[in-house]
Amino acid sequence: MRINKIEIKPATESINPEFIFDINCVLDRNREIPLEISGHVLSENNKKLANMHQIFHFENQQIELSALQDRYNREYNANFKLTAPLNQRILDYIETLRTTNSKSDVILNIEIFVKLLETKIILSNMILGEKNNEGFKQVFYKHDPEFLTTETQINMWILSGNGGPEFIQTVNKKFTTRVTISSSDWIHDYCPVYQIGKFAVFEFLIPEYVEGTGSIEERLNKSINAMKKMENNILEGEWNEVIEDSRAVWELLRNLDEIKDLLKDDGYTDQAIENFNETITQLFKFSSKFLHQEEIGNRKIMPEMKASKEDAYLIYSLSLNLVNLISKKFQRLQS
């Protein structure tokens, strides 16, 4: 047996995230039957991510072991499927590794273990001679690759253990290969299925566009556009780009009299509004540290700060909370 091809895809009908592996293999006809198929999925740095379990194999195919007349292989193709259950911790680890890949691809090392049932039975070519004077027929061996017994001579099947008394054996085989999921496939085919970037852990909906042509409506909708850009950059692992896109949120919603009035109408005190606005100002200054080499307010050259994943997630979550807060208070006021 040998592995010919492996294809991977996300399980679209599963509640929990899973990889599905479609595996095409080449078998020796009538010589071997796979009994058990399992495996491991490892990361690019060979950390175990998941176990692979057999779903089904050789669908609508009947496989038989036979006594063979020669030692020549007769190969045929067969397909089977394995599933690898995932969880959020595994997905987070994959995403983290992906950011270190030069092409942002997902690299998986695959180990497949197969237990095979193999036949060692060889068919001997035995033929009958003519009857002797006593009425018996002699038995002769004659090699004939097309040998078949007749219906009246079915007891002429003589079997050999191919050099020994053992007729059948189990064999364990291990196959290793590497599978690459391109960055574009991961973003477009896997992330939507696995809900990567949707941040379902928040107990509120991602804000939707609001109707109207007023200043607040316009600013909210532009902020939501900025959030969508941040989501895309998170999927692509562009952490500094996430923070850069967040500036639109801070600039659109800070130091605006209409926002202050909205908060006041919702019950905020003047002191609370002042503290809120100062918080937004400080967040804006903090995010700017990743983007400006000169310190705001003077010409001092600052050391370059490269955003990490956790920095981008912090800014994204704060931006999302801010847009959600303003959106909910505006909707409450309108109703």
Image: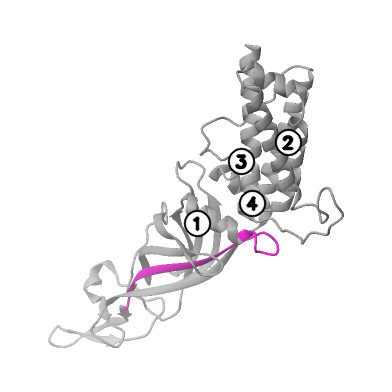
The answer to whether mark 3 and mark 1 are in CB contact below 8 A is no
Q: Is residue 170 left or right of residue 189?
A: left
Residue 256, compared with residue 66, is above or below; it is above
SS assignment at label 2: helix
User: Marks 3 and 4, Cα distance to the nearest angstrom?
Assistant: 10 Å
Q: List the residue tagged with mark 2.
A: 249
Q: Nearer the viewer, mark 2 or mark 1?
A: 2
Task: Name the foreground residue: 214 vs 25.
Answer: 214
Mark 2 and mark 1: Cα distance apart in space: 42 Å
Number of the front mark, 3 or 1:
3
- Residue at x-position 58% and y-position 48%: 190
Q: Earlier in the sequence, mark 3 or mark 2?
A: 2
Nearer-the-camera pick, 133 or 176: 176
Residue found at the far front of this picture: 271
Q: Amino acid at mark 1?
A: Phe
Look at mark 4 in the image and give the residue it sits on: 311
Residue 35 is situated, as x and y percent measured from the top left of the image, at 33, 64
Q: Which mark is residue 317?
A: 3
**Magenta residues?**
98-120
Considering the numbered disc 1 on the image, is that residue within a helix, a strand or a loop? strand
Q: Amino acid at mark 4?
A: Asp
Residue at screen point 58% across, 40% down: 198
